[in-house]
Amino acid sequence: MLPNRSRTSVLVFLLPPLLLYCAAVLFPILQSLFLSFFSWNGISDMEFVGLSNYVRMLTADDIFWRSFFNALIYLAICLVLQLGGALVVASLLTSLRRGRELIKTLYLLPAVISTVAIAFLFVRIYSIDPVGLLNQLLHWVGLGAFERAWLSDVNTVLAAVSAPEGWRFTGLYMLIIYAALIAVPKELEEAAVLDGANKWTLFTKIRFPYIRPVWITTTIMATTYGLRGFDIPYLMTNGGPGQSSELLTTYMYKTAFTSTDFGYASTISVFIVIECLVAVGLILFMLKRKADS
Amino acid sequence: MKKLLRAAAVAAAAALALTACGGGGGTTDPANVSPTGEVKPREISWLLSRPADGAVINIMKKLADDYAKDHPGFALNLITTPDRPSYIQKLETLAAANKLPELFDTDATPFAQQLAKQGKMVDADKLLKSLDIYDDYRPGALDYQRFDDGSLYMIPFQFELEFIWYNKALLEKAGVSVPKSLDDIPAMCTALRSAGITPIAIDGQDRWPLERYVAYQPFREAGPDFVQKLKKGDASFKDAAGQKTVTWMAELGKAKCFQDGFSAQGYSDAQNQFTSGQAAMYNIGTWELPSLATDKLNPAVRDDIDFFTLPTTEGSVTAANEFVSPSGIGMAVNSKTYDPLVSDFLKFALEKYPAEYAATGALSPTTNVQTTIPANATPLYKKALETANGLGSKQAMPWDTQLDPTTNGRLQQELVLLVQGNITPEQFTQTMDNAIEQNAPKFFK
C-alpha cells in the first residue's frame, strides 16, 4: 500500500498518458460510432439514417461478408506462420549451441524492412511474366505444373498476400517466445528428464505451461495485428482480382476514401473494433479455461 | 499502415473542422469572375496531381517566379500527388474539411459536380471568356472538362490523344494486319498467341487502362451518350451496346489478349513489355511520346513501332477520327479564396502558358501555338501531333471520370474477373447493373 501522497503523485503521472489515450484512441472510436448512424459523403449535409447502415452491412452487402471471411482466412494464415513458426524456431534455437545471435538477427530482419519494400519484393517473387523467384523455384524442382500468376489467380491470391505479413513478423514473435523459453528453470527440466520424460513430454508438460502467459500475450498481439492487416494486401493487389483479397480494412478504407461514404465506412470500422474485442475475449477465455483445467 | 494512419488523421481533422465550421460553403459568388479591389500579393497553393518534374509544373513554377518579380510577396505553392487514387482521397478529404486551397485539380467527376453545385468552384466558362482566351482553346479540350449539363468548371493544361501502338514486325510474324474493326481484335490476339507473342501489354495494377477498353464498343455502337445514361441508371449493361462491350471484353479475355498475370503488373512493367518487343500492342496516350517516338526508344524496336487510332465497327455511329482525346486532369479555382490576386495571376499565367508548354514538345490545349518537335524525335512524333488537327467533334470519355466512385470501383474489380474468365458475362451484367442501381441515385439525384 502506498502512502497517500505518493498515490496522488502516481495518479498525477498516470493522468497525461490516460488523456492522450482517450484523445487518440477512444475519441476516434466514439466518433466513428456517431458517424455510423449517418449518411455523409464529406461535402453533403449529414443525414441521420438510424440503423440502416448496420442493416445494409449485415444483410445486403455481399462484399462485406466476402471481405469478412477473407479477413478470417488471412488471420488464420498469419497466425499459423507467426505463432507456429515462431514457436518452432524458438524451440530449435534453444537447443543450438552457437550462432544463436546470427539466426535471431536474420529472422528479425524482415520486421525492420519497410512495408512498401516488402510489398514490392513479393510482387516480384510471385510474378509470372517476367518469371519471379517462386515460379522459377517450382520450375527447377520439377513442379512446373504449379507455376501461375499467384496474384492474379483468384484461388491463390489471398494466401499469397497473407504469407508476406506472416513471414514478416515471425522473427519478432520468435524473439519473445525465445526469451520466455530460456527463462524456464533448468532444474525443472533436469528433474523431468531424470523421471524419464522425452523431448515431447518435456515440451508439453514443462516448457509450454511455463511460457503460457507469454503465449497468451503474443497470441493476442498477433491476432489483433492480423485483424488490422491492411498495408501489404492493399499495396500488392488493392483487394483484387475482384474481391479475392479484399479484407475488411481495405474495404473500409475504400468505402471511406474512394466512395466517400464516410457514414457506412464508420459502420464497418465499428464492426472491426467489435471484432477485435471479441477475438481477444475469446482467446483469453479459451486459454484461461485450459490453464484452469 | 502509415498511409492508413495518415488518412485516419486527416479524416479525424476533417471531421473536427467540419463540426467546427458547420460545413459552410463558399462565401463568394462563383459567377463573379472579375473581383474588384487591390491585388495584394500573398502565397497561394495549387493542390495538383501531375508528375513532379513534368512540363506543367516546371512551367507554372517559372511563370509564378516571373509574376513574383513584379508582385513581391507572391508565391505559388505546388503540392503534387502524382498517384491518382491517393490524390483523389486527399482532395475529397480536404473538400470534406472545407479546406481546399486556391487552386486544385479534378476531373469532371460526379464528386466535382457536387462541389460545383455547392458553389465551391469558379465558373471557368465565364473566367476564360473574361480573360478573352476562351476561343483559343480546342473545343475538344474544353469539352473533356465539362460536366454532363455542359457547364465548365475546370481549365485544361494538356491535350492528349490515345492511340494503340503496335509492333509491325510482331504483327507480320503472326500474319495479322492492323484491325479494321474492334471486332477483329480477339481473332488477332489468338493468332498472336499462337505465334508465341503477347498480344497486348496492359497496366492492370492501376485499373484505369483496362477500363478504357470497356468504353470502346459502346462509344462506337451508341456514341458518347451511352455512358452518361448508364451512370444514372437510364441505360443498362443489358442494352445492346452494353451487351456488346461485355461480350467483347469476355472475348478479349478468352483470346488471352493481355499478358499473363496482368492484374498485378504496373505501368512500367507494361511499357517495358512493349518497348522490349515482347508485346505486340500497347494502348497509351501522347504523353508517352517522349519515350515512344524519340531516340530514347529501344533501338531494336524503334523502326517497327507505329500506331493506329481506335478502330471503328460495322454500323458505328462515331467516326474514325473520334476516339479518346483527353485534356488531362483540369484545374479548378476555389470560389471561396478567389480574389483580385488569384484572378490577376491566372490572367498572367494562362496567357503565357500555351507557348511555353508547346515549346516542350507537348500538345497545347489551345490552338494558338505550334508544338515544337524535339530534335531527337522519330517521324512518328510528327505523325502523332498531326493527328490532333483532324479530330471529329465527339470524343470517347474514360469511364472512370464518369461513373460514381463506388460503381467505378466495382466495375474495375469485376472487369478483371470477366477478362480472366472468373465470372460469366451474365454475372458481370447482373452485378454491374445492381451496383449502378444501388449507388447512382446518391450521386445523380
Image (spheres, coloured by chain):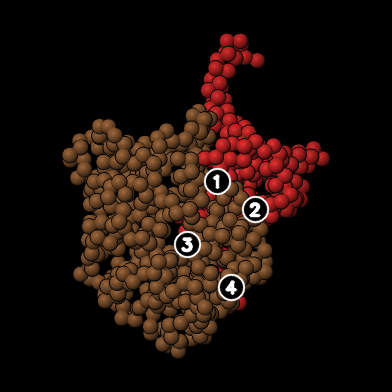
Same subunit under labels 2 and 1? no
Q: Residues within 10 Å of mark 1 (few under 14, many from 20)?
A: many
Of the residues tagged 4 and 1, which is closer to the observer? 4
Residue at mark 1: chain: A
**Measuring 53% from the left and 50% from the top, which residue is drawn there?**
A258
Residue at which label 2 appears: B438
Name the amino acid, label 2: Gln
Q: Residues within 10 Å of mark 3 (few under 14, many from 20)?
A: many
Residue at which label 1 appears: A260
Residue B244 — which label? 4
The C terminus of chain A: image quadrant: top right
Q: CA distance from mark 4 to mark 3?
A: 17 Å
Q: Earlier in the sequence, mark 3 or mark 2?
A: 3
Residue at mark 2: chain: B
Q: Which chain is brown?
A: B
Name the amino acid, label 3: Pro
Q: In this orientation, which residue lies closer to the viewer: B296 or A257?
A: A257
